[in-house]
Amino acid sequence: MDKLRNMEVMVAVVEAGSFAAAARQLDLSAVMVGKHIRQLEEHLGARLFQRSTRQNSLTEVGAAFHEDCRRVLEQVRWAESAVERQRAVPQGLLRVSAPFTLGNEVVAPLVADFLLAHSQVRVELLLTDSVVDLAGEGFDAAVRIGAIADEGLVARPLKPYRMVIAATPGYLARHGRPERLADLARHQCLSHSVWQRRVEWTLRDGADAVQWPDIARFTCNQGDGLRQAALRGLGLIMQPEVLLAEEIREGRLVPVLTHCVPAPRPVHIVYAPDRRQLPKLARFIEFVVRALGVEGRAV
């Protein structure tokens, strides 16, 4: 038995004034209207209408139940309209994950711009180099570097993640500019501690291929710490282009070995498929894709 439908029919009978009028209003037969009322009465164990050859009037129980039905149906309509309002206007909390460096340098500023444009949205941004479980950890979307392993997610491509090797003009004046991979042996190299445990980036020069030097003058577990050391002229740094873009643009760091840098890695924004995606997520996805997609700025 569809209780809500039966309640809708009862309210329609009372407001229309008769079973026949309610049938016309609901596009049902009078017999079907009567069936809905009988189902309600059998379920409740009480007579709702006093039937006669001339008219059908509410019993005392029926009058009280009618008022309760109206309130219930109003609440249902309010709940349905709330969902539709949420689908019409971006609002509510978005939980987003992104890798630390890319997230800090690129995603966080984009989130701020998005929030300025959508006053009813809140965003919780988690910067982590771990891969979060979107469904299990309650995230709406994540920016990921590398191949997408979860085929159950929608993955929208963004600009590839590029690396750059650079040093200060002063360092290069003292130690010379490296031209080949073999030149790295006579340079001070700065390295991320993750690379000491898990080699990730391969440098190539024609047929030659080497890993970024394992023995580093300075090792740090954060790219920004390496950037600060490089800016003081300590040595060569290899870091994501987004982390060093401003310093390179201003000439404080100079790219070297540009023909040897590792191949760019794919970047995607991923999210669960949803036939009726809420505006807060749909607008955010499109905002990020416009800024960082194929036609957007490089990352």
Image (spheres, grey):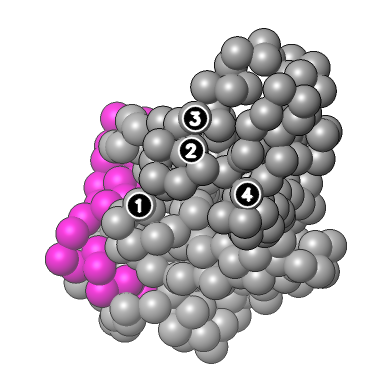
Q: Which residues are magenta?
A: 187-211
Check disc 1 and report its element: helix, strand or loop.
Answer: helix
> Which label was assigned to residue 38?
3
Q: Residue at x 46, y 46 (%)?
A: 46
Crowd class of label 4 (few under 14; some 14 to 19; many from 20; radius 10 Å): some
Q: Amino acid at mark 1?
A: Ala
**Is 205 placed above or below 162 here?**
above
Q: Quadrant of residue 11?
A: top right
Disc 2: which residue:
40
Q: Amino acid at mark 2?
A: Leu
Q: Earlier in the sequence, mark 3 or mark 1?
A: 3
Q: Residue at x 45, y 31 (%)?
A: 39
Q: Where's residue 213, x and y in %?
A: 25, 63
Disc 4: which residue:
59
Disc 1: which residue:
135
Tags 4 and 3 touching, CB below 8 Å: no
Seen as rendered, the residue at the extreme front is 53
Tags 2 and 3 touching, CB below 8 Å: yes
Foreground: disc 4 or disc 3:
4
Seen as rendered, the residue at the extreme bottom is 232
